[in-house]
Image: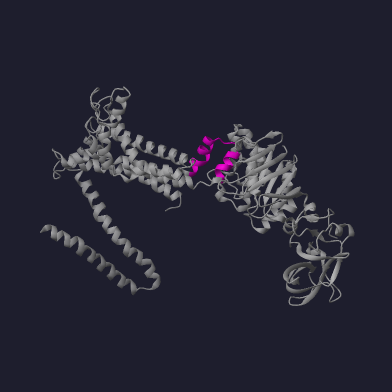
């Protein structure tokens, strides 16, 4: 087991002008579960493949433990990877697939068999050891891919969207299984996903990437309560945070007809007439007094049992802006109606309009 | 006048009869229930092909079987004497030559094609290199044989060498080699290898094409997974690439075995079986068209070739079935 360090690591694909991964600095502690998340094309998979040695590092360095592996071929890095489509060897049985790395390493047959069996037990794969991948279900293949990684007892696990080929229910189930299994084994893990829910539920820490640039690294809670910029604010959380430009007034920001109070200290660090505010759906309420707050036309109410979500739009300084807010799942206004929304005081995230950077360093804790 | 009749029969009557048969059959089919129509129609069209095959293949096979049991002129009953002759002292070296072809040629073509396909997949100017390697496929075997005979041309040491190979050897001060003309005997296998070399050269392109398609179809992640599992490039080839492309390799091997069984043109043109290079198909040709003609011998050889092809065909079909193609 070992830590993993990206030190100004960059990858520029031939024929491209913009690096796919740009000066990435990232550290993963020994035994930590780090999730790389971001939209497609953000460079998360490329970063993982650089760590695996499958992608060239054009500048900077990558370390596994103390060892600089930048120019070490994949076979000598002592890492195991779970691929999105599992990449199981089709001509080998489950047992052979799982034992392949050990066979290559020259480990004798008996030990190989016992280690494969041990991993198979861990993953409920015992009855399938003699089968070929073709005869397995998607979930079973996924487990074989996990098993193949576990048997290795590598220094680092790399996982490239390992759940995206599973159906929704199985994905949620497998998500917790992987997270607990990896924690139990205590192996450093770098996990790539485009799904922010997966990132929030699995990771010890999350690194958010966009356009090859690292946006923020932190615990799931950090990212949720203190997003470093507009991108992270909008990316983490589901439904996404409401983000729109608001006017700065004395004592707070304008929110429709009402003013949401903002701490003097925070407000004083805004050097512009307007600011981008972010409010999570759970921090917006339908105001009890009609005419007070932001007038919103309701487009849709999404009932999810206990909770519901109100989707509507408002006219904010001449621009149609879509808004989401959490409402009670049973008692709520209906689509087509007009309501006034107001934000809970102290639950606003403030961002600089120009740079998109967060203003103030205080986390916004949802009650 | 006979040629005019042939023209009329071939170009007008045959197509006309075919169209008439199909039209009549379609008319009958149109009166059937839709479900029956769907079942019957393919057979009507297939039957045309089946009849053609029967006329051009099955009938000759039956005739050959009959001839193989008769004497030199095809009339007197001869029992199995032709087959006894076919394994006798006259034929034995010829059979051995074919055996050499059967082993060296398919293995040579396939091994080189696999090697080239895998290496081509790793180089930058892959397309250019592949075109160059596949180009010989465009040359007919006859033309290749004629050209290579020139390239193999031998003159005694010190004389002007017209053959490319010997010219090069002599330029480096090495004794010229009689590529095709070593006297029959201990060294005759070298003559055979020279011939096989030509066949490998001419067949490599198509084999390379098939194997390249298979190599390209190996998912990149499989190679990556193997590399991460600690495999060297050789290990990746051995444990991942080769098993994955194996069905294609088998197809290439079996096709080339069939080709080696009936190899004729290269031998006929380059040596006509002299200097210990005769092969079964060339012998068959000579039994039919050279004095003394012996139709019984020729037919026996033809039957043997057919029988030898059956296990290879079976292997090929089984491979296709495994791949879900049949």
Front residue of this view, candidates A300 and A58: A58
Where, quadrant-wise, is the N terminus of chain B in this rendering? bottom left
Front residue of this view, candidates A134 and B135: B135
Residue A342 vertical position relative to residue A154 in the rendered view, above or below: below
The scheme the figure's colours follow is one colour
Which image quarter: residue B256? top left
Q: Is residue A128 visible?
A: yes
Report how many numbered discs are placed on residues in the image: 0
Q: Position of residue A269 (x, y in %)?
A: 84, 56
Q: Position of residue A319 (x, y in %)?
A: 72, 70
Q: Is residue B4 left or right of residue B271?
A: left
Indicate whether residue A72 is drawn in magenta: no
Which image quarter: residue B261? top left
Residue B78 vertical position relative to residue A193 in the rendered view, above or below: above
The residue under the point 24% across, 53% down is B56
Q: Is residue A113 left or right of residue B180?
A: right
Front residue of this view, candidates B283 and A365: A365
Q: Is residue B55 left or right of residue A151?
A: left
Q: Is residue A203 visible?
A: no
Q: Is residue B84 left or right of residue A332?
A: left
Indicate whether residue B243 is drawn in magenta: yes
Q: Position of residue B227 (x, y in %)?
A: 58, 39
Q: Position of residue A132 (x, y in %)?
A: 55, 46
Front residue of this view, candidates B139 and B287: B139
The residue under the point 38% across, 66% down is B39
Q: Main secondary structure of the magenta part?
A: helix
Residue B24 vertical position relative to residue A8 in the rendered view, above or below: below
Q: Which residues are magenta?
A: B221-244
The residue under the point 23% across, 64% down is B15
């Amino acid at each position: 087991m070992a830590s993993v360090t990206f030190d100004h690591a960059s990858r520029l694909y031939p024929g491209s002008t913009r690096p796919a991964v740009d000066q990435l600095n990232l550290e993963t502690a020994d035994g930590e579960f780090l999730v790389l998340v971001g939209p497609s094309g953000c460079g998360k998979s490329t970063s993982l493949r650089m760590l695996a040695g499958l992608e060239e590092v054009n500048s900077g360095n990558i370390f596994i433990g103390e060892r600089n592996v930048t120019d070490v071929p994949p076979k000598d890095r002592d890492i195991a990877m779970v691929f999105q489509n599992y990449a199981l060897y089709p001509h080998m049985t489950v047992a052979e697939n799982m034992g392949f790395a050990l066979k290559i390493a020259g480990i004798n047959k008996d030990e190989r068999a016992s280690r494969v069996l041990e991993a198979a037990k861990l993953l409920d794969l015992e009855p399938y050891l003699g089968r070929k991948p073709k005869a397995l279900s998607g979930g079973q293949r996924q487990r074989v891919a996990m098993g193949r990684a576990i048997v290795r007892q590598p220094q680092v696990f790399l996982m490239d969207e390992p759940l995206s080929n599973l159906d929704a229910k199985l994905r949620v189930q497998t998500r917790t299984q992987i997270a607990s299994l990896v924690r139990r084994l205590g192996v450093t893990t770098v996990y790539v996903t485009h799904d922010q829910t997966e990132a929030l539920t699995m990771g010890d820490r999350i690194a958010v990437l966009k356009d090859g640039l690292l946006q923020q690294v932190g615990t799931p809670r950090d990212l949720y309560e203190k997003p470093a910029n507009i991108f992270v604010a909008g990316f983490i959380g589901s439904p996404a945070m409401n983000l729109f430009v608001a006017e700065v007034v004395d004592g707070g920001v304008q929110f429709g007809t009402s003013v949401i109070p903002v701490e003097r200290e925070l407000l004083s660090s805004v050097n512009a007439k307007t600011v981008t505010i972010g409010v999570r759906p759970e921090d917006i309420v339908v105001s009890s007094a009609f005419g007070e707050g932001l007038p919103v036309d309701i487009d849709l109410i999404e009932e999810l049992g206990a909770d519901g979500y109100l989707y509507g739009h408002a006219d904010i300084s001449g621009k149609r802006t879509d808004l989401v807010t959490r409402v009670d799942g049973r008692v709520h206004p209906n689509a087509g109606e007009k309501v006034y929304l107001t934000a809970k005081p102290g639950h606003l995230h403030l961002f600089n309009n120009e740079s998109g950077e967060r203003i103030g360093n205080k986390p916004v804790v949802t009650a | 006048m006979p040629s005019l009749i042939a023209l009329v029969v071939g170009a007008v009557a045959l197509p006309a009869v075919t169209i008439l048969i199909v039209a009549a059959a379609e008319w009958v089919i149109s009166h059937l229930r839709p479900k029956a129509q769907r079942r019957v129609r393919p057979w009507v069209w297939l039957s045309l092909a089946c009849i053609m095959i029967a006329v051009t293949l099955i009938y000759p096979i039956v005739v050959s079987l009959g001839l193989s049991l008769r004497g030199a002129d095809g009339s007197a009953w001869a029992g199995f004497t032709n087959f006894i002759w076919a394994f006798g002292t006259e034929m034995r070296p010829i059979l051995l030559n074919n055996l050499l072809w059967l082993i060296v040629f398919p293995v040579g073509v396939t091994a080189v094609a696999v090697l080239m396909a895998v290496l081509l997949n790793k180089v930058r100017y892959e397309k250019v290199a592949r075109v160059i390697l596949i180009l010989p496929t465009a040359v007919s075997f006859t033309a290749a044989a004629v050209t290579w005979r020139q390239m193999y041309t031998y003159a005694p040491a010190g004389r002007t060498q017209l053959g490319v190979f010997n010219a090069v050897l002599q330029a480096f001060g090495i004794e010229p080699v009689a590529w095709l003309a070593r006297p029959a005997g201990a060294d005759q296998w070298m003559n055979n290898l020279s011939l096989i070399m030509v066949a490998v050269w001419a067949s490599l392109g198509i084999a390379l094409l098939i194997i390249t398609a298979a190599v390209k179809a190996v998912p990149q992640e499989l190679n990556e997974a193997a590399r991460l599992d600690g495999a060297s490039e050789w290990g990746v080839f051995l444990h991942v690439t080769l098993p994955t492309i194996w069905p294609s390799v088998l197809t290439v091997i079996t096709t080339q075995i069939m080709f080696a069984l009936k190899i004729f043109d290269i031998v006929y043109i380059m040596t006509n079986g002299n200097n210990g290079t005769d092969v079964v198909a060339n012998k068959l040709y000579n039994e039919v068209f050279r004095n003394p003609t012996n139709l019984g011998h020729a037919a026996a050889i033809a039957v043997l070739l057919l029988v030898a092809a059956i296990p290879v065909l079976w292997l090929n079909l089984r491979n296709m079935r495994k791949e879900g193609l049949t």
